[in-house]
Structure formats: C-alpha cells, structure tokens
Amino acid sequence: MQFDDLLTEQRNHRSTHIDRESTLEMVATINREDHRVARAVQKQLPQIAAAVDAAYPLFDQGGRLIYVGAGTSGRLGVIDATELQPTYGLSGEQTFGLIAGGTSALTQTVTAAEDSAEMAQADMAGVNLTDKDVVIASAASGQTPYTLAALQFAQEHGALGIGFSCIEGSPLAELADFPITPVVGPEIITGATLLKAGTAEKMVLNMLSTGIMIKTGKVYQNLMINVVPTNDKTFERAKKIIAEATQTSTLAAERALERSGNNVPLAIVLIETKGTIAEAKALLAATGGHVSQAVKLNDSQR
C-alpha cells in the first residue's frame, strides 16, 4: 500500500473546518476524536492481554523490555521505558528504548533515520539480544523501515516481538508475534500521527508495561511496592505504601522499613506474616519476589 493511501494519512471529514471553529468548538472536536481512540484500543484488549501473558514470564526470568520506533512512536517508547525505572525500581539495563537517529532524535527531527534498515540492525546488534528479551516495536503506519528492520532482527535472534500500529494488515502487524492494531482512523489534522495514533500508542504501552509489572510482582494490591527510598520524599512514600498495604500505622511501617534495610516488599511481607526477617526473605525467595504470592504461601503453611 502506498503511503498516501494509508488510513492514517487520509483527511478526516469531521474536522474539515476546524480552522473556522471557535476555540471551544475546536477543542470539542479534538475531544470527540479522542473518544474514538479509547474505543479503538478497547477492541484490542484480547491482543494486549495475550501479549502481556507471553511477555511477563520472559521478563520475570531476567529478560528485558526493549522499545523501538522512529519519531513520535520512538519517543513514546523511550518515555515508557524511562518512566518504568523509578516507578518499579528497575535499572536502565532492564528496560530501555531505541529510537531512529539515536538520543539526539528525542529532541530534534532526524527524518532520514527512519528509512535506514542498516541503522536499525546496528542498533539492535548493539544490545546483545537473547531469547528472553521482549521487543515492542511501534509505528503508526506499520511500515517504517527502521522499525520493521529492528523487529525482524530481534525475532531472528529469538526475542519476542510485539508490534503496535494503527493499520490492519500492515507489514509490522504481519511481522509481529503479537500485533496490536487499534484503528483510530484519519487524524484531526491530516497526517499528524502525534495526535490520535500517538494517544493510542501511549494507552497501549501503558497497558502492556503495567500489565507486565503487575504480573511480575512489582505491584501489591494497587501499590507500586518497588519504590527505592533514596531521599526524604521517597522514604515518606515508602512508609505510606507499607502502611496502606498492611493497614498499619506509619510508625510501624517505618520500623519495618528500617528492619528490612529499606526494602519495601520485604517490609510488607514482614508485617503481613508477623514472622522474622529470615522467614520473610525465605518466602520472597520461594516466590520469586512476588509479595502477594509470598503472603499466600505463608498463609497456606500455617
């Protein structure tokens, strides 16, 4: 399919006269189109769930989440990877993003880079892929050469490939092990895929990464328990998380945090099981660091 024929490049008849609308009418038009994005993503929930179920065991076994893309798609991937690190206590080696044109493309337009399959192959070769890695490749059009080449290289080296695009049957969708294709339709401003396609990508990436984090024990109840207390702010947040998770006082949470060596999951298990540090550590070791499973195991052993 020619680029100009892609649905993402077509004119949107619902916004044809947006330049004549009042400011309130203009933002209302944009808002109505954004509602269509949520519905398009909703239709992809089975595919998103399947991708999470395939990805989380690999990440749990030491695999990495690697995002690849060009332009807006690449920047959103880098953002997701970067934000996962402080939120869930991950390192930059566990999750990171590769963008066509390198780090300079995060703040500048490097248009020629997205057409380079050779650059994609070199970038992927530099990260030493394994069969436990998960590569999330994003391209609104589903046919960006850099993104396609990166995903193909990753899969040839055993990595799991998840592909996000907004075009059904695109080359990226055909290539990916798990294609996710919310069809958001023509953009409000013709061809400006930073709008609806970008919103759809952010929503999908949120679901993928959050799902993987939950499944791999980085969340207890609905609390982000892998926060690392490194300053006064994060120390107070850690105490609050422990207190809320265990329905105890902040003073008890602080004492447990001190006993656990500032390890939030360990402090929670310590309170929930009313055992010793050694017992709490053993429970976490037996369950791969999953707090909810550790608490459940303790209950079953009583």
Image: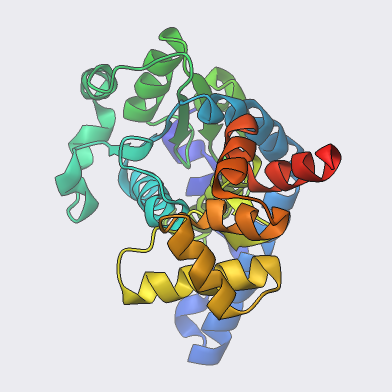
> Dividing the picture into quarters, in which one does residue 144 lie?
top left
Lateral position of residue 268 relative to residue 296, left or right: left
Name the one closer to the observer, 269 or 115: 269
Name the one closer to the observer, 212 or 176: 212
Q: How is the image coloured?
A: rainbow
Residue shown at 57%/27% (left/top)?
A: 173
- Location of the C terminus (image quadrant): top right
The percent position of residue 41, horizontal first and vertical second, equals 67, 50
Name the one closer to the observer, 168 or 277: 277
The percent position of residue 172, horizontal first and vertical second, equals 50, 26
Q: Can residue 206 be seen here?
A: yes
Q: Is residue 275 above or below residue 25?
A: above
The total number of labels drawn is: 0
> Dividing the picture into quarters, in which one does residue 157 lie?
top left
> Dividing the picture into quarters, in which one does residue 223 lie?
bottom right
Residue shown at 52%/20% (left/top)?
A: 160
Lateral position of residue 32 relative to residue 260, left or right: right
The percent position of residue 36, horizontal first and vertical second, equals 68, 61
Residue shown at 71%/38% (left/top)?
A: 49
Q: Is residue 74 above or below residue 57?
A: below
Lateral position of residue 188 relative to residue 286, left or right: left
Q: Is residue 274 above or below residue 154?
A: below
Residue shown at 60%/75% (left/top)?
A: 31
Lateral position of residue 267 relative to residue 87, left or right: right
The percent position of residue 63, horizontal first and vertical second, equals 46, 25
Name the one closer to the observer, 116 or 209: 209
Q: Can residue 189 be seen here?
A: no
